[in-house]
Amino acid sequence: MDFDPTPEQREFCAVLETFAEKELNDDLVRRDHEGEFSRESWRKVAEVGLLGLPIPPEYGGADADAVTMMTALEAVGFGCRDNGLLFSVHAHLWAGVSPIVRFGSAGQKTRYLPPMAKGELIAAHAMSEPGSGSDAFAMSTTAARVGDRYVLNGTKTFVSNAPVADLFVVFAVDPDRRGFSGVSAFLVDRETPGLSVSPAIGKSGLRTSPMAEVILDHCPVPASALLGREGAGAAVFTWTMERERSFILGTALGTMRRDLERCVSHARTRRQGGQAIGGYQAVSHRIVDMRMRLEASRLLLYRLAWLIDRDRPTQVEAALAKVFVSESFVQSGLDAVQVHGGYGFTTEYEIERDLRDSLAGRLYSGTSEIQRSLAAHQMGLTSRGARR
Ligand SMILES: Cc1cc2nc3c(=O)[nH]c(=O)nc-3n(C[C@H](O)[C@H](O)[C@H](O)COP(=O)(O)OP(=O)(O)OC[C@H]3O[C@@H](n4cnc5c(N)ncnc54)[C@H](O)[C@@H]3O)c2cc1C
């Protein structure tokens, strides 16, 4: 096995780290406080090529392999301290762009992918509902066929990017065929009559990534808006979630690496009781544990990317990596605050924000409990898999 990045990957990462550090962190403490999404940063991440990574060249992207994408995500996560912005990028790429690349018709690809790569069109993914989260296919949003179109009715919640999105990947069920096999996926433009977006939902972390409810009130969409065929929505959703949970914590590797470096530096320079605090075993072991979690997280995610590049099955590997990296992210966030003492709790030190941002990792793209259930099912331990 070769653990070294290629010279091209190394060079790309160096460019991304420097770019992200210089261009994406402006005024962040205030923007986080006010929950402000930065369109300027969005434009910049598009310019540097991040939004085109999984898009084929004929639609304006780079068609990067999975390992290259993972290295790029780690690099941008290291340089960019705006985890909310990066979360919006993830929501756009893995739950918006990727299913179109995989399941979209030629017309849908031509229409949507080029502006998505350029950052001119922002995507959102609308699956969760007030009554169905982990049990996603128990949804009540319906798609009734009326002549040559579908009429959508229902409310989606926790939709990341919704306040700024131009395109929604919406999942809805045939009212006459409820459950798994009745679900279809649709590409719904923001201007579609009957579609409205609630005011932004406030949250404790990822505050620069806006989230809202999406209300579909007799919302007509043409048959050409179907993503994949009618009734194939469950397959679209399952594939999309596996892809999302494989990459969504790639940037967390960069955040964990940055926080680790800050802890090492702080522990070597902060003196208490006549010595650097890093000289106390209780402090140094905590930092070593952070390093251990980071190394293990990197191995899990890079191997997962390697498997994706070889078209191997990754259901279990994606679930395990999602649980381990998200839980490591939270624990290392707690440790980073502890190592910094009272300073770690202040907004000025920008350590507590990473902890707040990390909390959602155990929830989005299927909770840790659901990932464990998915893995248990794949390992033949349970007869009914989790519904995500
Ligand atoms: C930051 C963030 C961004 C999100 N973005 C999006 C988005 O863009 N689009 C979208 O559609 N959704 C999005 N979500 C929603 C997310 O997918 C759901 O929050 C998640 O699937 C859990 O559903 P729920 O919140 O309804 O919790 P519930 O399903 O009610 O779960 C509550 C608790 O019960 C546990 N539980 C539930 N069922 C089981 C079970 N079968 N076995 C064991 N434990 C179980 C859960 O693990 C959890 O601990 C986002 C969520 C967050 C936090």
Image (cartoon, rainbow, N blue to C red):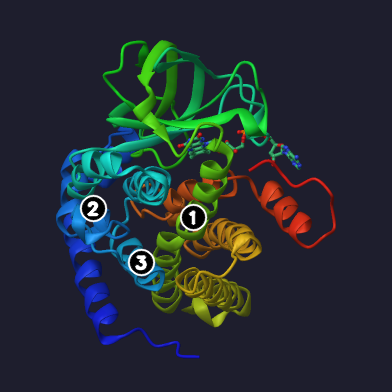
Left or right position of 371 against 264: right
Left or right position of 335 against 348: right
Q: Is residue 42 above or below residue 290?
A: above
Q: Nearer the viewer, residue 118 or 327?
A: 118
- The kind of residue tagged 2 is Asn
Badges 3 and 2: C-beta atoms under 8 Å apart?
no
Residue where numbered disc 2 is placed = 25
Left or right position of 225 against 242: left
Could you tell me if residue 118 is visible in this image? yes
Task: Please give the name of the residue rendered at 69% of the width and 47% of the height, measured from the top-left corner.
Answer: 370
Task: Please give the name of the residue rendered at 26% of the width and 86% of the height, measured from the top-left corner.
Answer: 7
Q: Earlier in the sequence, mark 1 or mark 2?
A: 2
Residue where numbered disc 1 is placed = 243
Residue lying farthest to the bottom in this orientation: 1
* Pair 3/2: label in front: 3
Q: Is the C-beta of the residue carrying label 1 under 8 Å from the nearest atom of ligand 1?
A: no
Q: Secondary structure at mark 3?
A: helix
- The kind of residue tagged 1 is Arg
Q: Position of residue 154 (x, y in %)?
A: 51, 15
- The kind of residue tagged 3 is Met
Q: Position of residue 155 (x, y in %)?
A: 50, 18
Q: Nearer the viewer, residue 125 or 279?
A: 125
